[in-house]
Amino acid sequence: MAKANSAAQDSVEVVSEEATDRPNVPAPRDERDPLQMFVSGAMSFSDLMAESDVVLSDGDHWKDEQLDRLVGVPFAVVGVTFRNEMTRDFKGVKMRGDYATVRIILGDEDSMRKGKVTIDDDVYPMREVLFNDGSTGVRRQLVAYLVLRGVITLSDASGDEVVTSGAMGECDYDLPVHMWKDMAAGETKFDGGDTVTWKYDFPRPLIAKRGLRVSEYENEHTKDGRTRYLA
């Protein structure tokens, strides 16, 4: 569930019996009733959602080749799940690594219009999308953000000061989920073996106003490398 407004906006002041001449007087009703305004046509569905709690589904899981459609498309990151189901080189040592499954909601019609986004059957307002990333781009950005927010605490495998940049495996933000020191929130699951899954729903969405951006590179392993970043 994503909370769209503050508790103060949602609440109605309680009037005690001592404060009125008549007993059992109901608390005054908010004159601006979003549901009644929507039914009467005075409020759009988008505005109603901004005044309401919204049920979030898992969304459609996009494959890697679809993700370039998100370049320049505003979206909100509403959650992330880390799974250590891969092998990765970390500071010269082969170990179990992880990847992030990112849960996003695309922007509304107004934000897409301002961003000159072409709306079609794939990219449309408020669509819920999932995508995977295990790179030095989106995944590392999210880990850095969660560390900054105090949601997770990293261990330092090298015993030296925490490294916050570098190639894959040289940065401590690349540490897999099972090597993190602590998670202050979220849900951790163990499969009985070595697999660890940690799911976290953002209480406050992280906005990527320009969606994704793509950085292309070449190295000794590939001639057409691509890393995606939140933008």
Image (cartoon, rainbow, N blue to C red):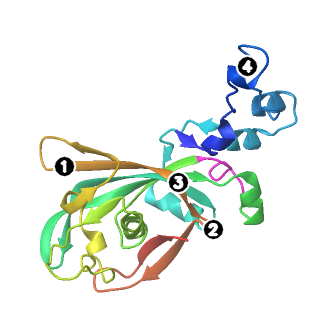
Q: Which residue is mark 2?
A: 72
Q: Position of residue 159 (x, y in %)?
A: 13, 78
Q: Nearer the viewer, mark 2 or mark 3?
A: 3
Q: Position of residue 56 (x, y in %)?
A: 53, 39
Q: Which residue is mark 4?
A: 26
Residue type at mark 3 is Arg
* Kind of element beneath mark 4: loop
Q: Which residue is mark 3?
A: 204
Where, by quadrant of the figure, is residue 181 drawn? bottom left
* Kind of element beneath mark 3: strand
Give the magenta range: 118-127
Residue shown at 68% from the left, 42% from the top: 9
Q: Nearer the viewer, mark 1 or mark 3?
A: 3
Left or right: 31, with 51 as reference point: right
> Which of the marked residues, 1 or 4, is nearer the chain's N terminus?
4
Q: Are marks 2 and 3 in contact (CB under 8 Å)?
A: no
| Mark 1 neighbour density, 10 Å: few (under 14) some (14–19) many (20 or more) | some
